[in-house]
Image: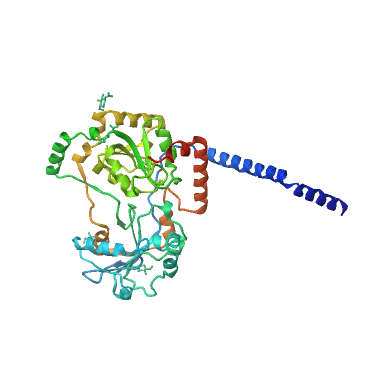
């Protein structure tokens, strides 16, 4: 009893002597946290150029013995959710469907659910991303109470898994089809698409390339524009390493400010030879418009593809950092291309053989699928399994924290934030 009171007294004395002690304690906490962060960062900071091999995603869909057959010659598609909170996608789809060789009727009137042949659900509007963006709308969401067995419920998603967040098991056994940039989706809708040129187009392009010199149009080297500073792929680490070999200017949210707004950064493209089209995560089949639009600016896209995308993109139209054995050889090669006129221009020869083609617009692809004659009825029994069968991971608070710490450690180590990227130009 006595000892306790003595200890208590001495403890109270210590407490009363706060200023020094408190400083001491605070200091130790700061040191410990810094050391932990440092240790954590140093274990995750290595850039590995290993590739990822994907297996076919099978076993998530249950097939029924009955077959899907549409009742109407003009299937009716009902937009059950908005797209990132907005119904603009409905109006845009109206324009798209007018040019489509297959005929479909579109509606956003939920009262027509009983007569609709397909229902569209945009995934981020019904997962927690939707809650963050627009809680009111998210909380109001309900699946229809009535479901015809021949009605197709379609999950629409163009976001990489790394941007999705939620309990995807909630959708097990609900959706019949998926509509996504993923190859294995029922309705395949990549961000970009190239088709082979016709003989005429080939000759025209050959003439055009002969009379142009894309290299001479530009007097700056490397450009990257994006807003996400602590992304899953840690592209800032790659950019930092590669800047030892080539000049790279970083614009957007965590780089130089764009002249006016984010869009005004677009004009920069005409000045830079190379565009670092690094995606924010290494997700299955995810090649965004960052890549697809480069040739219109006469830029070579430098990509960081861990996954083999050959066959999805024209050959010799890009430089993949992950095709090199190490960053040193990648950096040297990129610098070489940026300085060699012949070699640089040769990266556009593919335009003789391929041309960008939107294919059919998204809604037209849906419509075409709805006109299919004899496919069997099916449902994504394990929707979560299908969605997460990927080379990247879904978003989460832990991953966000890890990424933020990584970025902090990186900035601490390199001093990069202070010296270069926070200056405006
Ligand atoms: C680069 O080219 C632009 C016009 O295309 C010109 O305004 C600018 O002065 C040039 N800069 C250098 C460093 O040559
Ligand atoms: C530039 O690239 C071309 C084509 O690859 C090559 O033949 C030439 O030797 C290169 N020039 C220099 C100076 O490296
Ligand atoms: C579907 O129809 C096509 C052509 O009409 C036929 O070749 C194919 O075998 C059919 N498939 C099934 C599963 O019935
Ligand atoms: C769609 O999924 C539901 C729910 O499992 C199922 O009952 C229905 O047969 C499926 N319809 C088609 C046409 O695939």
The residue sitting at 43% across, 48% down in the picture is: 392
Residue 236 position within the rendered picture, expressed as x and y whole percent measured from the top left: 43, 40
| Quarter of the C terminus within the rendering | top left
Q: Nearer the viewer, residue 92 or 10?
A: 10
Residue 127: x and y, percent? 43, 61
Please give the name of the residue rendered at 44% of the width and 41% of the height, measured from the top-left corner: 422
Query: Which is more toward the observer, 148 or 423?
Result: 423
Would you identify the image quadrant in which residue 317 lies? Answer: top left
Residue at figure coordinates x 30%, y 63% from the top left: 88
Q: Residue 384 sits in which quadrant?
A: bottom left
Q: Position of residue 7 (x, y in %)?
A: 82, 49
Q: Quadrant of ligand 3?
A: bottom left
Placement of 282 over or under 154, stated as above or below: above
* Vertical placement of residue 230 versus 115, above or below: above
Task: State which quadrant residue 76 falls in.
Answer: bottom left
The N terminus lies in quadrant: bottom right
The x, y position of residue 9, in whole percent, is 82, 51
Q: Is 10 positioned to the left or the right of 46 in the image?
A: right
Work out whether residue 326 can be spotted: no
Compared with residue 97, is residue 202 higher up or lower down, i.e. above or below? above
Question: Can residue 59 be seen at all in this image of the molecule?
Answer: yes
Q: Is residue 149 above or below residue 304?
A: below
Question: Which coloring applies here?
Answer: rainbow
Q: Residue at x 40, y 42 (%)?
A: 255
């Amino acid at each position: 009893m006595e000892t306790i009171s003595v200890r208590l007294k001495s403890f109270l004395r210590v407490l009363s002597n706060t200023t020094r002690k408190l400083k001491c304690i605070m200091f130790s906490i700061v040191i410990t946290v810094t050391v932990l962060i440092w240790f954590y960062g140093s274990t995750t900071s290595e850039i590995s150029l290993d590739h990822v091999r994907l297996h076919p995603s099978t076993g998530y869909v249950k097939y029924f013995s009955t077959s899907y057959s549409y009742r109407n010659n003009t299937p009716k598609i009902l937009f059950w959710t908005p797209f990132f909170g907005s119904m603009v996608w409905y109006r845009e789809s109206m324009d798209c469907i007018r040019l489509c060789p297959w005929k479909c009727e579109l509606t956003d009137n939920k009262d027509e659910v009983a007569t609709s042949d397909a229902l569209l659900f945009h995934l981020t509007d019904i997962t927690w991303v939707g809650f963050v963006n627009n809680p009111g709308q998210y909380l109001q969401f309900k699946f229809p109470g009535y479901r015809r067995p021949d009605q197709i419920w379609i999950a629409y998603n163009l976001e990489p898994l790394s941007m999705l967040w939620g309990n995807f098991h909630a959708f097990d056994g609900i959706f019949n089809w998926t509509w996504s940039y993923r190859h294995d989706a029922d309705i395949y809708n990549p961000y970009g698409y190239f088709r082979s040129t016709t003989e005429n187009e080939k000759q025209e392009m050959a003439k055009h390339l002969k009379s142009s010199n894309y290299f001479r149009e530009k007097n700056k080297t490397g450009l990257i524009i994006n807003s996400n500073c602590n992304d899953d792929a840690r592209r800032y680490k790659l950019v930092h390493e590669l800047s030892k070999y080539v000049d790279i200017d970083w614009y957007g949210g965590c780089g130089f400010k764009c002249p006016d707004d984010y869009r005004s950064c677009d004009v920069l493209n005409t000045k830079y030879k190379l565009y670092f089209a690094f995606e924010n995560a290494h997700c299955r089949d995810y090649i965004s418009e960052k890549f697809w639009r480069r040739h219109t600016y006469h830029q070579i896209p430098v990509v960081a593809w861990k996954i083999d995308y050959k066959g999805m993109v024209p050959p010799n139209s890009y430089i993949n950092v992950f095709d090199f054995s190490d960053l040193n050889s990648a950096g040297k090669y990129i610098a070489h291309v940026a300085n060699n006129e012949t070699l640089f221009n040769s990266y556009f020869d593919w335009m003789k053989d391929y041309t960008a083609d939107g294919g059919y617009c998204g809604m037209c692809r849906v419509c075409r699928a709805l006109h299919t004659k004899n496919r069997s009825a099916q449902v994504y029994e394990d929707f979560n399994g299908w969605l997460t069968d990927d080379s990247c991971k879904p978003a989460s608070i832990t991953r966000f924290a890890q990424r933020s710490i990584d970025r902090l450690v990186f900035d601490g180590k390199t001093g990069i934030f202070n010296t270069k990227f926070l200056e405006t130009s």
